[in-house]
Amino acid sequence: DDDLDDATLHAKSLFDAGEYRRAAESLSVDASETAPTSSAKGRRRFLAAGGVASSDPSIHPPSPQLDAFGICLRAYALYLAGERRKEEEIVELRDPLERTSVRNAYLTQLSAELYDYYSAGSLDPFGMYVYGVVLKESNKSPTGTSTAATKFHSSEGTHTPTAHGVFIESLLAFPYNWSAWLDLSQLCIDDPSIHPDVEDSLRPISAHWMYHFFCVHVFLENQANDNAIAVIDRLIHGNSDDMPDRGMFVRSPYLQSQLAVAHYNMRDFDSAQSLFSTLAGRDPNRLDSMDVYSNILYVKEDRVALSQLAHRAIRIDKYRPETCCIVGNYYSLRGRHERAVVYFQRALKLDRTYLAAWTLMGHEYVEMKNAAAAVEAYRRAVDINPRDYRAWYGLGQTYEIMNMLLYALFYYRRAAALRPYDARMWCAVGGCYLGLDRRADAVRTYERAVSSGDGEGIATRRLAGLYQEDGDAEGAARCYLRHLELRYQAQRAPSSPDSRVGTPGSLEGSIDDVINQVRVDAPEAEALLYLAYYYRDNGEYETAGMCCSRLLEYPGPEKEEGKALLREIRSRMDRRGGSVRRGNAGVGRRQQTPETPQGEAELMGESMETSGRSSFEFSP
């Protein structure tokens, strides 16, 4: 501040007070002044681009005496003044199409002025950051001419500064500007084609820890959670295995929260809850990412912990979007959906771009059977972030409820494109194909879901039913057996850290272990009954009897059918003198076919291989 002149200090004071337009005007030429010849070229470009002349009292060109700090301060103040006015206009409009057409009125003027300074090399790293923001917003606006660059034509030729290129220049000069990293990451997420250029341009600072933070953020946004966890682990523990606690960020709250979010995205709710609980204990006044923590508690139906989190968030800051989201989840878990909507709407009043609130509010409207409001909420979510697969899935779910299956199929496929390894997405697509009587497409889709790790067994059961209806007994039996394996692995997972849930063929025990030890609920009873008939028809009476014996423990209608089938099997065995004939079922007895060269691959089918990924919990 000691090096700043009086005019710049005055403008900075106005900026700190939130009077952005006054701050910008204090660094502009007076109305009575004539634009200097040194800026005539930029002034002509500005007027040709549709700007206002200096005689217009709206805003005047910048003062010629500005240094790099003054240029940055004026540009940023003018940009914020335009953003404030844009938000005010959006609030006054009711038509969604009109809302999307509102733009920052100063973007064209700022683009022209900052281009002049950029060409002359007068921008410092922060000035280049502001220029990058202006280019980014200009290309997003309805009148933007391209998605990556703003072109200026002059007698000297054509130069095309791109938003990501300007951000990179700013970061190479000053890599500690996290805001620039965030804006650059958004460009990378929206336009994957710039990834090679960004990676190559940032190579000089690729070893910098800020670059690694940037990579973590991009990985999480792109659902590359394993990569994010690997980078976070390196930042926390360092590169040495002998000194695992010598990393630079052993106790970084931000990295701990990102690690928890990565586990949440992978549906490892126990690990995510443990990390968030530790983080909340270390920093009890933290609200950042606590809305994700509330989602985990919601999914696990932990009412006590969610209530405690909601009360603590209200004590810390009642008017934070995260607080409103936490309280909304609390009311939703209690079944008070109208009250939950009130808090999600309050979060959006505080921040209308708060993506989680739009998506969760859509979920609540679905629970309230208000399909029109749910569609509007989900559409606002995808407008904010087109890569939000939860909102696309919600749109598909809403249209499916309205029995508009073609619309539902379109949105489900959009969600599946964003989450190709999520079996839940493919199950939803398959359900639409079935509703449209496209059985062949449904079978292929369910097979894709199975290969993507159908941890919950939804696709496996539906595929078994389709095979059964088509008369493919072996295919149906293979699916039902795989479902039992998945359930057996899932119940072993908490006590067996080495078990790989969702990967058939990874069990050390035999099929006998699966049948005898799996917990029997309605889906398992259906599978056991079908397998009992299948093994009986193929002469594997011992295995068929084993399936029937498990059905005797289930209190449903399958119990009586299993009891009758067991008597029939014993009668057949008695007629054969107690001998057991082994048929060529091709399903189940892996250890009894050593001469079969295909082994487990033939048993389960190559299409049953999974990636070990599980599906996403959609509420919320």
Image (cartoon, grey):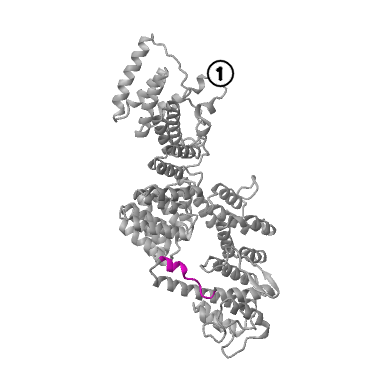
Q: Residue 327's spot in the image, x, y percent?
A: 37, 58
In the image, is 2 to the left or to the right of 80? right
- Residue 371 point in image, percent of width and height: 34, 55
User: How many numbered markers are drawn?
Assistant: 1
- Where does residue 295 sit, x and y in percent of width and height? 42, 52
Residue 580 at x, y percent in the picture: 42, 14
Q: Is residue 43 above or below residue 281?
A: below
Amino acid type indicated by mark 1 = Glu
Return the residue nearer the eye: 1 or 373.
373
554 over 340 or under it: above or below = above
Work out whether residue 577 or residue 490 is closer to the camera in this orientation and state it: 577
What residue sits right under mark 1 in the picture?
A: 595
Q: Quadrant of the N terminus?
A: bottom right
The part of the chain drawn in magenta is 96-106
Residue with the most extreme top position: 577
Q: Quadrant of residue 138?
A: bottom right
Q: Is residue 174 left or right of residue 295?
A: right
